[in-house]
Structure formats: structure tokens, C-alpha cells
Amino acid sequence: MSHLDDLVTRLDGTLADADAALASSYPGDRGVRQPVHTVYVPGDRYTADLVTEWSEDARSVLALHGRSAIEIAEALDLRPSLAAEVYDRVTAKLEREPIEDLRIDFEDGYGNRPDADEDAAVVQAARTLAATVRDGSAPPFHGIRIKSFEAPTRHRGLRTLDLFLGELAAAGGITDGFVVTLPKVTSVEQVAAMVTALEALEGAHGITTPVPFEIQVETPQAILGNDGTALVARMITAGAGRVTGLHYGTYDYSASLGVAAAYQSMEHPVADHAKDVMQVAAAGTGVFVSDGSTNVLPVGDREAVRAAWRLHLRLVRRSLSRGIYQGWDLHPAQLPSRYVATYSFFREGLETAAARLRAYVHGGDSSYLDEPATATALAAFVLRGVECGAVGVDEVDKLAGIDQRRLAELAKRKVAEPA
């Protein structure tokens, strides 16, 4: 054995634990689609017709205040050519798949009610979700938000989770798209407790596939512990592979830092700081990061609707440019601005990204010298556009000279299914 072989062997032994820890803690992208938004609806208002109703309401408000690409360009300050590219795609999306991710809410959106009332609403919601899963009308991603594991609401949150999982499992309604949202997390121990709870309930209800959950970052304790560490990073580890998302809670978090109501926003500096920490904590773990919501709703007369649309579009585009590809929507009238913002973002960057991918894969002249990591990012960008419906696979083939499978390989993802 040469001196170099001997050194390699020694260093392999020295670094074995570090190598294993890196592979375990940072497995990389999960290879699955991330929804562009999460729609929250109070648990007692969830019905089998909800997706259809949101679709109809969203298309109605669009028809009233943005009847054409020209009107949308005017309303949202878009280039007419870009508005023309996205308008028909958005209207088709609102008809075909208006809600990508649905969360049936038994927390703030539902409030505190007598146990018997919440029990009945939980059972009904679970049965309804199972029915929509069976008939294929459920959004591709869906789940429930329970009350927090803080002492005053812990028992009620567990009771709701138990009832919902039991009903859903009995009806065969648990799918790969199902997730539980744990709100107002204040300690790493609460995340570990959620793992314990899910393991116990899975056993009780005969659920054989681990149920994933999301952590809502709504308290400063999740970002910075009293020991000076970023607890949100430790929370991901405490989730034992079940944590799939970190969701920023705009208003609870801002209020907890003393930000006046008039200034609480997704773009406030305290929001940016929290989301920066969340992104760093989640990087390489396969955990998605989601922005929060705006509570300025597109309701009222044309001027009010369009003003709210412009605000929403700007905030969504801001999140996308910062690498946060998901957010919350609270009202059907926010869907047009959500998809116009998202589709225009991906379509504006499509030609350049595709040209760089073509040069990377096939060679040829390019003003960019892209490295493998950048090629992965370019492919992931284009693939996100395909997955949400902003970009067609035929366009990618034409512009980049690669098919959907090769695009997914470059993005280190599973083959995408067009929305």
C-alpha cells in the first residue's frame, strides 16, 4: 500500500462519522413536486364542492375585473406580451386545478368551540376528504391543521388528530399527498412529541405508511432559542424524517415581535429574517419552505380588487425571486393573482434558462459557463414551471432540446407530471 493509499484509508476512518451525519441530515431534494400555494379553509366550511366553488369564484372575479389579457396587463402592470402568454394558461388552470394544496383548518380559522362541535366537524371533514380522494376530486396535496401542542390546546389538538386520522384511514383516504400541519411550534420537544403522537396513532389505526407533517414558524422561539441557537434547524432533525415543510406565519410571528398591525407583512424585515433562517435551516434537507399570506383581499369594487391583485402579485413575485416557491392563499379571488404572478415568473425566465440548459447538455456557444450545480438549479426552475402548468413539455423540448425525463434527471427529481 502506498503512502497515499494509507492516508486515504486513515482519513476515511476519521471522517466516517461526519460523512454518515452529512448524508443523514442533508439527503437533498425529495424528488417530489412542491405546490405553489396552500389554501386554508375552516374545518366546518369544508365541503366536497369546495374546489369547484373556488374555481367558479376565481373565474368569476377574473371575468369581472380582468376579462382579457389586455385588461390583465392593465390591471397588474404587466407587459402586454407577457400577459398574453399567461392569460389562457391561468384561466385553464383555474378550471382544471385551482387548488394545488388544501389545508382543512381546525386551528385559528376554526377557533375554540365545544368539544362535541369540533368532534362532529372533524369526523365530517375526514369523511368528505376521503370521498373526494376516492372520486379523484381532491387537490393533489391536502391535509389538516390541528391546534398547537402548547399546554392549553394540546389535548384538543391530539383529539382532533386522532379522530381525523382514524376516520380517514378507515375510509382508505390517506394518500401520498396527505400532510398534517403543526402550528405555533415553540420548542424542539414539541416536534419530537408530534413524532411520538403520530407513531402511536398510526399503530392505533393500522396506518402502515408514516404520516408526514409541516412545522409552522409563527413564534420567535422557533427561530432563536434562549441558548442562541436556531431551533428551527434542530426541529427538522427532531422530526425524524417526517417534516416535509416549514411554513412562515406572517401575522402571528410579526405580532409576537411587537410589529404594529398596519405594518405586518410578508415583506417586513422581521419576516425576511425569519424566512432567511428557515431557508438556511432547510437547505439540503428536502424540507420545503413556504411563505405566508397577505390578508388584503381582492374584494369590493374594481379599483379595490385590482389594487389587492397588484399587491398580491408583487408579494408572490418577491417570494419567488428569493427562492421561496410556495405561499398561502386565503380567498378564491387571490387565485388569479397567484397564478398570474407564478406563471409570469416562470415564463419570463424560460427562454434564458432553456438556452443555458441546451448549451450545458449539447454544447455550443453561450455567454454563460455553467457548473453542474447551476445546471441543476436551471433544470429545477424549468421543471417547477412544467409542474404548475406555466410551461409545456413541448416548449422545453423545443427550446432546450431535452425531454421531460432528462429535465427531471438534471433537476435530480422524479419525472414531473404536468399540471
Image (spheres, rainbow, N blue to C red):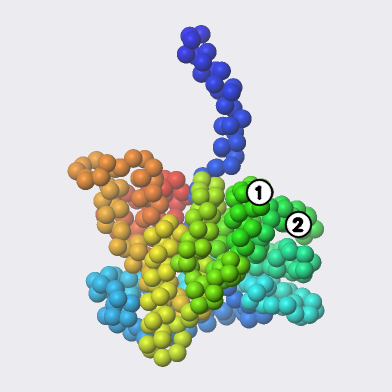
Does 26 sit above or below residue 310? above
Q: Is residue 322 visible?
A: yes
Where is residue 74 drawn, in percent x and y? 28, 80
Q: Is residue 23 left or right of residue 85?
A: right
Identify residue type, mark 2. Answer: Ala
Taking the spot 28% from the left edge, 48% from the top edge, the residue there is 356
Q: Is residue 69 visible?
A: no
Identify residue type, mark 1. Answer: Asp
Taking the spot 47% from the left edge, 67% from the top edge, the residue there is 268
Closer-to-camera residue (126/321): 321
Q: Which residue is mark 1?
A: 227
Query: In terms of image quadrants, where is residue 121?
Result: bottom right
Query: In terms of image quadrants, where is residue 50?
Result: bottom right
Where is residue 402 drawn, in percent x and y? 32, 49
| Cα distance between the residues tagged 2 and 1 | 27 Å
Q: Which residue is mark 2?
A: 197
Q: Counting other residues with Cα less than 10 Å from the Cα at mark 1, is it few (<14), some (14-19), or many (20 or more)? A: few
Secondary element at image label 2: helix
Taking the spot 78% from the left edge, 55% from the top edge, the residue there is 200
Closer-to-camera residue (326/252): 252
Is the C terminus in the top left, top right, bottom left or bottom right quadrant? bottom left
Asked if the residues shown at circle 2 and circle 1 are in contact, with their CB atoms under 8 angstroms apart, the answer is: no
Where is residue 3 drawn, in percent x and y? 48, 10
